[in-house]
Image: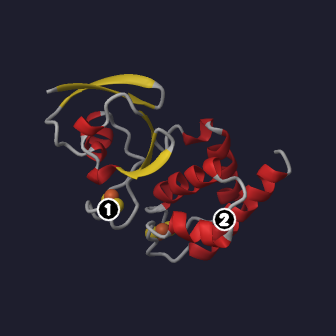
Amino acid sequence: MAFTITVNGHARRVDVDGDTPLLWVLRDVLGLAGTKFGCGMALCGACTVHIDGAARRSCVTTIDSIGRSQITTIEAIGATAAGATIQKAWLDEEVVQCGYCQSGQIMSASALLASNPQPSDADIDAAMSGNICRCGTYARIRDAIKRAARTTKAGG
Ligand code: FES
Ligand code: FES
């Protein structure tokens, strides 16, 4: 069945079954491999993308549920203000270890910063608790989100 979805600002036509997970479409049909497969059951956060600006698990989001919603992936998050700020903070804090979980982490963090530019520790915990990191980069992730919030507060 044919669906037209909007990914990173571009309309993309895909021909898949309606119950196909968005993650499969992004990676296998559209070649956007920055979004990762971890658990396939909404338990790890590796597959996080934005749907209309909110962090969503693409492994449990079927293609027929998307409609006209805007999808943003890690490949384009740097074009948003919050995404660019988060990515710079990630580099400044040297967050990444193996990297596998990090596109999902960045997508969750940038959705948080866009909706809540000055998050509290509790806000950060709530937004990031579904993103698992086997390398244990949690402390640096928190530092990077706080750095990004300071940057946002300072206006740049
Ligand atoms: S692959 Fe989607 S939450 Fe783990
Ligand atoms: S950096 Fe290795 S799993 Fe998170």
> Disc 2 marks which amino acid?
Glu
Name the residue located 66 percent from the left edge and 72 percent from the top edge: 121
Front residue of 34/111: it is 111
> Disc 1 marks which amino acid?
Ala
Residue 93: in sight, yes or no?
Answer: no
Front residue of 91/54: it is 54
Q: Quadrant of the C terminus?
A: top right
Q: Position of residue 113 (x, y in %)?
A: 64, 52
Q: Any atom of ligand 1 within 8 Å of the CB at mark 1? A: yes
User: As drawn, is 44 to the left or to the right of 141?
Assistant: left
Q: Secondary structure at mark 2?
A: loop
Q: Which mark is residue 156?
A: none
Crowdedness near tag 2: few (<14), some (14–19) or many (≥20) residues, C-alpha within 10 Å: few
Pick whichever of labels 1 and 2 is earlier in the sequence.
1
Q: Position of residue 53 (x, y in %)?
A: 51, 42
Q: Any atom of ligand 2 within 8 Å of the CB at mark 2? A: no
Q: Quadrant of ligand 1?
A: bottom left
Q: Position of residue 2 (x, y in %)?
A: 19, 24
Quadrant assignment, res 67:
top left
Pointer 2: what residue? 94
Q: Secondary structure at mark 1?
A: loop
Name the residue located 62 percent from the left edge and 45 percent from the top edge: 83
| Marks 1, 2: nearer the viewer | 1
Pointer 1: what residue? 42
Q: Position of residue 60 (x, y in %)?
A: 27, 53
Name the residue located 38 percent from the left edge and 39 percent from the top edge: 32
